[in-house]
Image (tube, coloured by chain):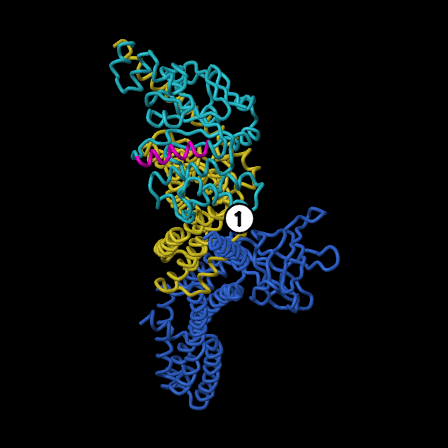
Amino acid sequence: MKRSNEVLVGLVVIVGVMVVVFGTIWLKGVKPGRERTDLVARFDRVGQLLEGGVVKLRGVPIGRVEKIALDSTGDGVLVTMSIRSDVQLPPEAVVVLSPESLFGDWQAEIGGKADPDFESYDYAQPVGAGVLPGYSLPELSRITAVADQIAHDLAILSDRFQEAFTTETAKNIRLAIENIQQVSEQLTGLVGKQQSAFDSVAADLTRTSQAAGQAAETLDRAFTEVEAAIGGGKLTGIVDNVQRSSVRVDSLTTELMAASRALRRMALGADTTLRRMGTIATSLERGEGSLGMLLRDTALYYSLAEGSVQLQALLKDIREHPRKYINLTVF
Amino acid sequence: MQRTWTAPFAWVGRSAVETAAAFGRFGVFGARAGRAVADVATWGRMLVVQMARLGVASLPIALFIAAFTGIVLSLQASYTFTGTVPEYFVGTLVGKTVILELGPVLTGLALAGRVGANIAAELGTMRVTEQIDALETLGYDPVSYLVIPRVVAGVLMFPVVVACADAVGVAAGWVTALNLLDMSTPEFVRGLRLFFLPFDVQYSLVKAASFGFAVTAVGTHFGFHTAGGAEAVGRSTTQAVVVSSMLILVLDAFWAVALL
Amino acid sequence: MSIELRGIRKAFGPRVILEDVTLTVEEGETLAVIGYSGVGKSVLLKSIVRLLEPDAGTVLVDGQDVGLLPREQLLELRRRIGYVFQFAALFDSLSVFDNVALGLRRQGSMNEAAIATRVGESLRLVELEGFEERFPGQISGGQRKRVGLARAIATRPRYLLYDEPTTGLDPVTTAVIDRLILKLARELGVTSLVVTHDMKSAYRIATRIAMLDQGRIRFVGTPAEIQQSADPVVRGFIEGRPELAQEVA
């Protein structure tokens, strides 16, 4: 009986100790038995990185942060990381600290200085041999500020859309088109040809109008020659008519040019904003920043990215087929 | 008759004296136990039996409690987090809560009932049937023979039991997350590891050891100082369970203040 | 070599049990202490081995003042004294063998083989051979008392203290126990102090009888002397006639 007690107690104690030892090792995420080496990087500051934080290379966890200490000069932080020694570090390795999730846990990511994802940061100068340069991403508050800026830009963008489609503009455009229709009645072939060009691009309107102007001039000259040749009669009336039309075409051209300039300015503004959004979205996609982590986990990022793509397509479409949209508003 | 109005004061006075005396007795008992610890030859031989009785025999109840705690925590965490917090935080909550708090405390309370009552009843019976006196006459120090092996076994085995309970609790939460919550193992494990520190385990074990000490020390104290008959044994047993349960909660708060 | 009690006084709270007890147990004799239940006979016995601390007075065992002994020496002294408890006080979790061997193991001077031999001898003396592997729960009350006796004599003590050895036993078993007490005194040469309220037993086993009453020793003498005592309290007790004692009170 005593003997079996001893065996039982021994078994339970061994199980308990194994649970503690292996449980701790497993929960720490350290694979035992693998060779490990220490890696030191220097930072200006370390954000919210803690000892035990994960170290990644190309997104793969390869170790843990062992120690965080101020360096001897006091104006930098030395972070010691314990990583698997079988990992091949990229040339000119640098370390970037970033949030791993929105909940305050930070990671250290190793990359090559030449890598486009890593080249744009302002790294702390390493002191001593074997110390890698490091950079800590701004914390959540800064990212929020950038997001705020984007929201602001979008608001301006939508304002511009509204400005562009006032009733005044619509009326002008309708008037212009009516004029063009009038002209087309009288200069069927010519203007009809120009109108098909006008259909395609807003920017082409300028050229079209200029062409229409030149055509009118040529016509004028032709008519003058014809008048000189034939003289008086019904022809003067026609010429007058054409001259009046050409004046109207000129004013139409001016109006359209103004309209298209506004459109282009607007498109340009949107483009800038979107490019900025695109940059942010790309870096979010890379998982930089707390927000990036959250976005990667949820659908939000995708809808944002998709939204920006759609918006871009929309603007492109507006630029290419302005009539489609103007029609919608006007008629 | 004249005494009637003084009765409440007398009661307060008596209670104060009794309380002080209780602490005094416990102090004397502790001092005596401190001396008895040196007598390794006596208690060392009794240790394995007590480790088996206090520790090994307590495993089923401890693991049972831990398993259900893990299941419930997992479900409740998922219910609480719905929509706002990523699912993998279920793992974090289950791991942290089981290891830091519920593993040690629920095990401690269960064992206060099981082990504390058992010790108090056993020693109380030995006291009233003169077995403790008999030990003295045979040249044994009953404190080394009866008290120390139980207390040492408690301090050694509670952490072992709690370690197993922690593991089972987390595992039960995990299995629940997989089967009832539609979570994946990598998700759960990610949450589990997210804020894990080896200190959590140490904290759990330190708590467990202190609970083991509290339960066995209180149980042996009340059992050892039983005076009277069967009724007194019952009283000692009840007191042992009540006092050791309270002590567990007080120690729990103490460690939270002292170590966190 | 003797046990000497000098002016022992013991009170539990306001209740004074022993007022002033002075008594000497001479070497080789069997002294029976008689008295009413609750008169403090067991308290007296426990004071000898310091299971209870007297409030006043001294206990001398072999000339050593028990009250002044440091713990280690006290434990050593207790090993020279066998104590037979009223209800045997056997350890339920241990077998008969282990119960009897407990004191021997504590001494640490014998190996397991010698201990087994000694346990066998002791059990033979109380006529319980073959009970080694039983547990206290599996044997009768009389057998338990005999195991208690075997445990007390296993260490071959010089003194044996019996606390109500025959209380609660049938007349036949009582006679068996009494015979054992005599046999042990004879064969082991121990000095015995027997606390009892059974006069028949007292007459059978005692070389001297002392009567404890109201915290003091009322009478000491041989069985023959006590039977001729003129003291009404003594007569009242030994003849079982309470009215005699009440006249005095």
Provide the letter of the chain coloured blue: A
Considering every residue shown, the one lying at the far right of the view is A129
Q: Is residue A43 visible?
A: yes
At which x and y percent is residue C66?
A: 53, 23
Compared with A59, B53 (above or below) is: above
The residue located at (43%, 74%) in the rendering is A317
Q: Depth check: A110 or B47 in front?
A: B47
Q: Residue at x 41, y 27 (%)?
A: C194
Question: Which amino acid, by three-letter code, is at mark 1?
Answer: Gln
Residue shown at 39% from the left, 75% from the top: A323
**Image quarter (top left, top right, bottom left or bottom right) of the N terminus of chain B:** top left
Q: Which chain is assigned cyan?
A: C
- Image location (x, y in percent) of residue C168: 31, 33
The chain painted yellow is B
The one nearer the camera, A49 or B73, is: B73
Q: Is residue B69 above or below residue A113?
A: above
Q: Is disc 1 surrounded by few (<14), some (14 to 19) or many (20+) residues within 10 Å? A: some
Q: Is residue C180 magenta?
A: yes
Front residue (pair B7, B88): B7
Q: Which residues are magenta?
A: C172-185
Residue A241 to residue B123: above or below: below
- The secondary element bearing badge 1 is classed as helix
- Location of mark 1 (residue): B202
> Residue A222 colored magenta?
no
Q: Height in image: A314 above or below C247?
A: below
> Where residue B44 sits in the image (x, y, percent)?
54, 44
Query: Which chain is disc 1 placed on?
Result: B
* Relative side of C67 to C232, left or right: right
